[in-house]
Image: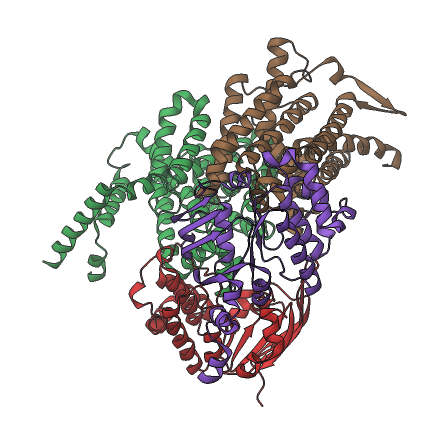
Chain colours: A purple, B brown, C green, D red
Amino acid sequence: MLKVRDIDVFHETFQALWNVSLDVRKGEMLALIGANTSGKSTLLDTISGLLHPTKGSIEFEGKDITKLDPYQIVELGITQVPEGRGIFPEMTALDNLVIGSYSRQARAKREQNLKKVYEHFPILEGRKKQTAKTLSGGEQQMLSIGRGLMADPKLMLLDEMSLGLAPIIVNELFKALREIRETGITILFVEQNVRRSIQEADRAYILENGRVTLSGTSAELCEEEQVKKAYFGITTAEICEEK
Amino acid sequence: MTDVGTLVSPIIMGILLGGLYALIALGLSMVFGVMRLINLAHGDLVILGSYIAFACMTYLGMDPILSLVIAIPVLFGIGFFIQQFLMSRAFAISAEAPLIIAFGIALIIQNTNQIMWTPLSRGLTTAYSLSSFHLGSYQFPLSYLLNFIAAVVVMLALREFLRRTYLGKAITAASQDRRAAQLMGINTKMIYGFAFAIAMICAAIAGIFLGMTFPFTPTSGIQFLIIAFGVVIIGGLGSIFGTFLGGIILGLVQTLTGFFFGPATQMLFIYVIVLVILAIRPKGLLGR
Amino acid sequence: MKFLVSRLTIGNVIVGAIVIILVVLPVAGGPREWLLYLLLFFIYLAMANMWNLLAGYSGLISLCQPAFLGIAGYAVAMGTWVSIPWWLGIIGGAIIAGIFAILIAFPVFRLSGIYFAIGTLVVPEALRLLFFLWKPVGGELQGGGAGYIIKGLADVQMSTIYWTALGIAVASAVIMRIILNSRLGLGLAAIRDNERAAASCGVNTFRIKLYPFLISAVITGLAGAVFYVYQGYIEPSSTFNVKWTMIILLATVIGGLRTEGGPIIGTIIVVFLYFLLARYAGYSLLIQGVILIAIMLLSPQGIVGIMRNTRFYRAIFQLANRRLANAKTE
Amino acid sequence: MNEPILSIDGITKHFGGIVALEDVSFDVQRGEIVGLMGPNGAGKTTLLNIIAGEYPPDSGKIKFKGRDITGYPSHKTCHLGIARTYQIPQPFVTLSVRDNLLVSAIFGRQVSKAAAELEHDRIFDLADLSEKKDTLTGELTSLALKKLELARALARDPELLLLDEVAAGLTEPEMPRILATIKEIRNMGKSVVLVEHVMKVMVNAVDRIVVIDKGMKICEGKPEAVMNDCKVIEAYFGA
């Protein structure tokens, strides 16, 4: 469905991604795991068209989207739920959702999608008149995901959904994600909670310093020490050895 | 000597005048709120609106308010052009480039006004703009009341536009979080063009009502730019209600200082107050 | 001597020769017209250099330069009404402009970027109104909108004014060079590039920005005062006028913001334009505005920026410098 | 025990309703390297910013060499002897490498230009930048930018260094070089607060680790002990 091939991405002069390739298959739940500044968010932003690679290509459903602008990519059916929620703080919750259906194909399905969002997150219906900044952290994250759904996406990218949220709420969010996936939307999520990611996803990529260092199905990645090594660059056993 | 009764008149005048000032500031506030650009040409664009009405009145015999049908599309087009072809590129060059370009636009408009309509002081004089109305035992120019009504109407219309339409919501969204707006499928470049153009509609309306209230010359722009800026720093940028309040405060400052110290000092007081507010609250009195 | 020789690059030699020619021009019988245009050139150059220091090197888009030149001009004019000689008035005026700069620094330095620009824009407007109202010297017919004649200029030679202006222009260029090579210049560059990182490297950003503001006020004041001595007359509307800002801005931007040579080239073009556009005085702001926008969009680094990118120019200068170096070693 | 060089006492900071730091306290002894770790958004960088004086805390006190420096602006904390690096390098892009270091040396130590230039070479060597003195920083590679960030902080000759993720973004082979530099810094007797994700750097370099999660200190101690602490594993890997 989505093919990322050998991309290099720079933040001004700082190279954030090196020769990264990644495949997303239709209908799957894919995790992208990595530490701070490993390049996860950069990769999502590049797929969304906020950044453009200096090398390599990105293909979505057979169409080259490497050079498209963000709004064109949204129209093709890729939506991103940004890190830190990125809701519009001074607008009402409902307006936040409505603005999610801005792109052409989504406007027609606005009411239908709104109903879906309220099914996934019933709490939002009661909050719809409230200014978004007055919502709790968990509700804001739900709003952000709901807003993403309003774009009527085929592929949904989620950036650090669980950041700063209590475990109970994270459970709820992942439950909603599973439901969303049941409706046929493909999901690519970025997460730093390794164990959780591997449990939830079908497959995962591990990104380290802007490079893909490990990838595979959840079963393959269950060897925990291996993941830990990729994540920390060292395992606990090795630490004690070195000292 | 100055008992409370004599103050009623300047206070009401000030509030009514404040409507006009808010109207002048509305476009400046919007362009800043959405694009983070202080449009140094705003005053001159407002005055361009006044001149368009003046031309319609002189050559076509149109009523100034009716001439909005010409002034609005012209300024809408100019606004869209400035944003799409000049400012959007300027932002990519450096922080100072948009300012310098806005300054250049200001001078071009100023000079064009001068070439087309000479440096003479002009006014939009109609039968009703000269008449007055009574409120109790006090008498006020009708044009001040019209200003106030126009300001209220434009502000309500703008508010409803921003709240109810997709375009309006997209503008609001882009001003609050550009990145997130892009991710929602909003073509922010285009939206910026529309935001600038809509701000210029406000400028056109402001220019026409200004012309009915005060005489203007091609160089009046800077005076009204500073007033608009004063309104905005009092009221906070990007807030319609704040802009209205800021306008009324400045209007009151002007009429009250005029009342106490004579008309020659009014503008000087406004400038000093703008500077003092900047010194105390650099982000504006009601600013976020 | 060795020190001098080591500084002997082709650029310095040319600049030195030009300055000497300019100095002797009045006694060598240069036409009065020329002197006049050169006088304007010197005055604009000093102001443009100072604006370049502010906007180009310090990131302070100051739109209040007319305030400095106007205050100094008024100081000279009013001074002559109470029998202060004009030359003392120029110096006094510049000092008053400097003090004024420190005073307004407190409100405007709390603003950054665009806010700073608009904050400074208010200042000359306020002064214009002030000088319409304030007439401390002279009778009913002087001051206010009528302005002041500058007295006691009857026996002042054109060449005296010319040399004073030349001196100020050269001084402004030398001061620029000194500042750019000093710790102040380094601090300014750091602030301009990244104010946050500069502060964390120990740069006191308020104080470092105050210096160029003060220096620019003094030099712009000097240049302005000389201009009004030449004009012999001052009144508020044309003094505290955006046209001054336009000239200064245009000279700097056309030549090349943030380049040492930019203001010189830009000022030559501005004076030339002034000369060319004299016939179309009504259109001059329009034309200048278009030039300003075009340069800013097409070559933000101005003409110097274009030249830097031209291989031809680079090659010539490298060759010339190498020849000179060879000559020195022989 | 001597008085600590840096003492952080009950720092709390909120950003518009979101808790960034909640009652965080710890000390740094003279010559000690303290590692600060925690997942994304835990508040590590916020803490560095508060120590360096970019913004004041809502409550709590920071003492440096026994002096209360809470709320000091960043140029003042720098003059007192604190230098910091940024996670994303913040060079002065129009200046050469040499001038970048000079800014820090001149203004940080408040000395003349000549005095600052004298000591210069040592810093270039230390940060491995000798060959790039005259390069404009806009043209440097990621690794060189990271080194420059470090060198610029060192040019201040600080008593306390705040290092924010010096190794982030570097490749495996580049790691040892940074590690060596940190060890040299330790040998110079400087105190360091090191924010780091790369475990190898952390474990090899630090004397003590402080772990924060969701703005709160959850653990403090020797590296081995901390790494085996359940709460730390939990914070990173999730329960």
Residue sitting farthest toward the right: B136
Q: Is residue B132 left or right of residue B277?
A: right
- Residue under the image location 57 percent in, 29 percent down: B44
Q: Quadrant of the rendered structure where residue C128 is? A: top right
Q: Please say whether residue D66 is visible from this viewpoint.
A: no
A133 versus C271 height, above or below: below
Q: Quadrant of the rendered structure where residue A169 is? A: bottom right
Q: Nearer the viewer, residue B93 or C129?
A: B93
The C terminus of chain D - image quarter: bottom right
Q: Is residue D183 left or right of residue C327?
A: right
Relative image position of residue C312 (x, y in whole percent): 21, 41
The mark total stands at: 0
The N terminus of chain D - image quarter: bottom right
Residue sitting farthest toward the left: C330
Q: Please say whether residue B39 is visible from this viewpoint.
A: yes
Relative image position of residue B98 (x, y in whole percent): 49, 39
Residue sitting farthest toward the front: A219
Q: Is residue B184 left or right of residue C295?
A: right
A164 versus C117 height, above or below: below
- Residue under the image location 47 percent in, 33 percent down: B86
Q: Is residue C113 left or right of residue C329?
A: right
Relative image position of residue B163 (x, y in whole percent): 71, 36
C183 versus B281 height, above or below: below
- Residue under the image location 35 percent in, 53 percent down: C177
Relative image position of residue D113 (x, y in whole percent): 38, 66
Q: Nearer the viewer, residue B54 or C98?
A: B54
